[in-house]
Image (spheres, rainbow, N blue to C red):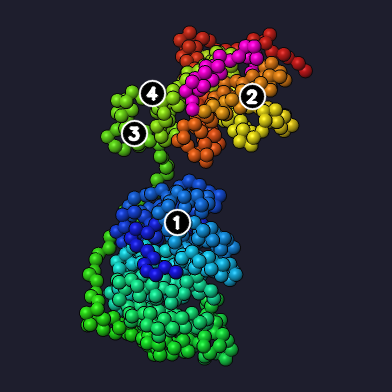
Amino acid sequence: MATGQLFSKATQALFYNYKQLPIQRMLDFDFLCGREMPSVTGIINPGSEGFQKLFFGQDEIAIPVHSTVEAACAAHPTADVFINFASFRSAAASSMSALKQPTIRVVAIIAEGVPESDTKQLIAFAKANNKVVIGPATVGGIQAGAFKIGDTAGTIDNIIQCKLYRPGSVGFVSKSGGMSNELYNTIARVTDGIYEGIAIGGDVFPGSTLSDHVLRFNNIPQVKMIVVLGELGGRDEYSLVEAVKQGKINKPVVAWVSGTCARLFKSEVQFGHAGAKSGGEMESAQAKNEALREAGAVVPTSYEAFESTIKETFEKLVEEGKTAPVKEVKPPQIPEDLNVAIKSGKVRAPTHIISTISDDRGEEPTYAGVAMSSIVEQGLGVGDVLSLLWFKRSLPHYCTRFIEICVMLCADHGPCVSGAHNTIVTARAGKDLVSSLVSGLLTIGPRFGGAIDDAARYFKDAYERGLAPYEFVEIMKKKGIRVPGIGHRIKRGDNRDKRVELLQQYARSNFPSVKYMEYAVEVEAYTLSKANNLVLNVDGAIGSLFLDLLAGSGMFTKQEIDEIVEIGYLNGLFVLARSVGLIGHTFDQKRLKQPLYRHPWEDVLYTK
């Protein structure tokens, strides 16, 4: 268990199982406290990735969303608090995953009903690895003026009323989240407020105990007195009794154990928490209060006297010069949300688009952070601009040159291919440039120019699985799938596509590795033994060579390469290139003033 302060104004957290309201409350608290950066640095939503938009003061921010605990921890190594809003069914497994991450120091488990056997395993692992578990069945905790977990302390209005936007000098720990909110208010009325407050949760086996946190508070210089609210059931309070008796705590401890009314009932009563059930006289509230009083804690005669007892203890510290009330500060105004403030005119409206590739808000546009003037001054080309806008990084010259070669070689392939034919027919029908261009682009697909991504996917999978070329081809044949990137309507083994040869020559001379291309060539050698037209076509050449570009440049992770292929970047290269030729065909037809096209009868087979 940690021996000192858990949180600070720089604490960053990962939030498991996206819940908009608790996260927004955390961010509003951050802004209220004057934090420079939001406390929630990443969100984990199993099966999802991307961003979630939330507000940090007046500014809307995009918080990254990760699909796994491991990915989030790797992406945000400075986040050391894990806030788990998973259901009781998955809370234990996800919490254990977090505890096993070296970057995670504190795990807060919000869910109620976590199986006790699972909780015991979490506790044992945390203790063995010097980590802290708060909960299960907890609202969390708060360090005033610095950091809070989820819904701790409730609304902003309540936080302001409890003066939690700045640190006081009282350490508070309780089993109950609801009663924590009540005591934050009480303590703010009669002292200078909370420094840190923790609700350990109401389960029978909490991840950390009352005494764990009291001992921590004793080691925090800013904490001058400690307030504890226990409850009947269990024996957690007795560890605190022993700590006080042994002199481990040298600060005033004001404590009360609730549940004294249980004796009024003729039978045993189960109160709200799973652990709030007396298992004998020692677990009664009266016995615990008496033990705490005898040990040296300040224990009032009733809960009604709790507030005045806290007040008297604090005033005594002030009189003895052991503490001085903190100076009050005025917290900033939290902007109201649209649905609340629309009538008053104080609104903040969410954005509808997230963009990471360009920005036109400054003096000049930027591509991936590179100013337009810098692009021109450096003499960068189309390949460089494409690398910035598509890959969000500046690729080496041999990579951008390869991109430009692909664009040049794929710009057009004559008027007879389907895309050019459609564009020509549309242009001759009198349609505008965009309509003519789009009619041609819409033909791009698995049979025409849209096989680059599939070629890359299949070649990559086969190569990485260690399949011999003949195994790969035969497996595809059994599945009834044509090998993407192999085969041509016109080209043959003795009449290769010159574009493929030019791409291969460039890659062999400039790429650090061409392992994927060589694998594609070996596949071609096998397919040519089957039929003379099963040559490596331009789709297959670009698909395999782009894999070599991505892997060989050393600028992309395996996950990024998989994502690039999956999203369709490589087909995008063909779309970009062929747009040049399709626009040319449109202009050509309009310049020649060609009439409406009608297909000749003799070129149609009319049959019944």
Identity of the residue drawn at 46% across and 50% down: 74
Q: Is residue 496 above or below residue 15?
A: above
Mark 1 surroundings within 10 Å by alpha-carbon count, few (fewer than 14), some (14 through 19), many (20 or more) = some
Identity of the residue drawn at 25% across and 76% down: 323
Q: Which of the 4 image quadrants contains residue 216?
A: bottom left
Q: Are marks 4 and 1 in contact (CB under 8 Å)?
A: no
Q: Nearer the viewer, residue 40 or 509?
A: 509
User: In this orientation, does residue 309 appear?
Assistant: yes
- Residue that mark 2 sits on: 522
Mark 3 surroundings within 10 Å by alpha-carbon count, few (fewer than 14), some (14 through 19), many (20 or more) = some
User: In this orientation, does residue 110 appear?
Assistant: no
Judging from the image, what secondary structure is the residue with disc 3 in?
strand
Q: Nearer the viewer, mark 4 or mark 1?
A: 1
What numbered label is drawn on residue 255? none
Q: Which of the 4 image quadrants contains residue 562?
A: top right
- Residue that mark 4 sits on: 381
Q: Which of the 4 image quadrants contains residue 92?
A: bottom right
Q: Amino acid at mark 2?
A: Glu
Mark 4 surroundings within 10 Å by alpha-carbon count, few (fewer than 14), some (14 through 19), many (20 or more) = some
Q: CA distance from mark 4 to mark 3?
A: 14 Å
- Residue that mark 1 sits on: 103
Q: Quadrant for the C terminus, please.
A: top right
Identity of the residue drawn at 41% across and 73% down: 213
Q: Amino acid at mark 1?
A: Thr
Q: Which residues are magenta?
A: 485-512
Residue 476 is situated, as x and y percent measured from the top left of the image, at 70, 31
Q: Earlier in the sequence, mark 4 or mark 3?
A: 3
Residue 23 is situated, as x and y percent measured from the top left of the image, at 43, 58
Q: Amino acid at mark 3?
A: Val
